[in-house]
Image: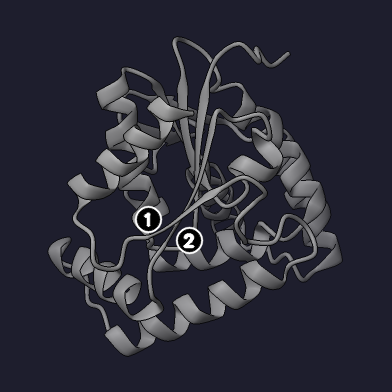
Amino acid sequence: MMDHSIPVIAIDGPTASGKGTIAGRVARELGYNYLDSGAIYRVLAVAALAHGLSPESESDLRKLDALAASLPVEFRADRIYLGGKDVTESIRSEEAGTMASRLAVIPSLRGHLLQRQRDFRRGSGLVADGRDMGSVVFPDAALKVFLTASAQTRAERRHRQLMERGESADLAVILADLQARDKRDTERAVAPLKPCEGAHVLDCSDMSIDEVVNTVKAWYLKA
């Protein structure tokens, strides 16, 4: 049962908008718990890839349902484990991100993972980031933010992240992939990506991390 007395800040937005970085910083500065909802979908994506499962296959979809219902995921400190294996780095791959986006449009899989996300609402408060935190997972959030940036800006940020990790990256390919994900996420039938009612829309294309964090905290203190 979800404890509605625990305040939630919901930060939604498209891929590479910086919502994870911002949500993590806001959570640390407020002393709140943090939920990276995308990580849960990415863990399922890694499991699907490991088993060679495709969401377009009816037989594989049944296996994915069973996998999601009993997903052996653990969050320990700043590490993420799948069946005891550290997948913190592998879930951040482009392949895992693309698969996660494909899985996220399937209602049955979303249903299995919904309660896992709500279980993070504990302690003194929660900052959650994702695509439907304010609309579906925590509709009673004290503050709802829709963080966005231009596709070009987001592609450049993602490209920089991959290069800093020593991974090969093509900016044009990343941009095309982001645009495809945006289209898929905004057009899906279940919880399409868009600002929910009551959300503060923040375009951070030309803002620093500190500026965005301070803006979100100021909105929260006024909520």
Residue, x 50% and y 80% (percent of image)? Answer: 179
Residue extending furthest toward the bottom: 172
Q: Which residue is mark 2?
A: 96
Residue depicted at 31% across the width and 33% down the height: 26
Residue 43 placement (x, y as % from top left): 52, 46
| Type of amino acid at the residue the image marks with label 1 | Arg
Image quarter in which the N terminus is found: top right
Q: Position of residue 151 (x, y in %)?
A: 40, 77
Classify residue 54 by image quadrant: bottom right
The kind of residue tagged 2 is Ala
Question: What's the image's color scheme?
Answer: one colour
Q: Is disc 2 surrounded by few (<14), some (14 to 19) or many (20+) residues within 10 Å?
A: many
As drawn, 24 above or below 212: above
Q: Are marks 1 and 2 in contact (CB under 8 Å)?
A: yes
Q: The residue tagged with tag 2: helix, strand or loop?
A: helix
Name the disc covering residue 92, or none.
1
